[in-house]
Image: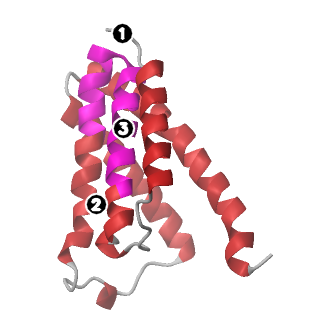
Amino acid sequence: MSGQHSAFVPLAAMMFAAGLGIPMFASLNAGLGQQLHGAISATAVSFTVGLLVALAVLSFTGFPAAASFTMDKPYLYFGAVFMLFYASAVAFSAPKIGLGNAIFFVLMGQLISAALIDHFGLLGVIQSSLTLKRVIGLFVMAIGLYLARKPV
């Protein structure tokens, strides 16, 4: 197996685990939002805890050099804004439409966004054209998500 292929399985497993964690995060953040009476409050607490854990890990693995923090590509910092929107939106919406429905709509958005980002090679990712086979696959996945969605 080549180096690229041998790295695929552990990376795929890691991303599968991350996928398992997204609904758990959504559920926990939604519950925290209800407890704190606000989605933004819950997200602020979640981000603060995440920051503290990240800083603890960095204290063992090493902090990036100050010179690494440049504004050459300022759009790279917008990831935090998108994460803030996701976390707050799910904390607000999940108690109203159900966690499953909230995650299903997130998945639909992820499929569309990922396909477009890959197709055009946006934001520095590896370009991967949207072929008819991929469009059919995305359509089948969208149908599956729609069928799995719970009526409200």
Please name the residue shown 35% across and 72% down the image: 121
Q: Amino acid at mark 3?
A: Met
Mark 2: which amino acid?
Gly
Q: Nearer the viewer, residue 79 or 103?
A: 103
Dot 1, crowdedness within 10 Å: few (<14), some or many (≥20)?
few
Mark 1 highlights which residue?
Answer: 151
Above or below for 28 versus 53: above
Q: Residue furthest top?
A: 152
* Lower sequence index among marks 2 and 3: 2
The verdict on residue 93 being magenta is yes
> Where does the image place residue 146, in percent across and percent down from the top left?
40, 24
Determine if residue 105 is in view.
yes
Q: Earlier in the sequence, mark 1 or mark 2?
A: 2
> Considering the image in quadrants, where does the C terminus appear?
top left
Residue at screen point 44% across, 78% down:
63
Left or right of 103? Residue 62 is right
The residue that mark 2 highlights is: 79
Location of residue 90 by image quarter: top left
* Front-lying residue, 99 or 56: 99
Q: Amino acid at mark 1?
A: Pro
Label 1, label 2: how far apart the Cα atoms are = 32 Å
Question: What mark, if any, has residue 108 been given in the picture?
Answer: 3
> Image check: 4 left or right of 103?
right
Give the extent of the magenta segment: 87-115
Residue 92 vs 119, above or below: the answer is above
Nearest the camera: 2 or 74?
2
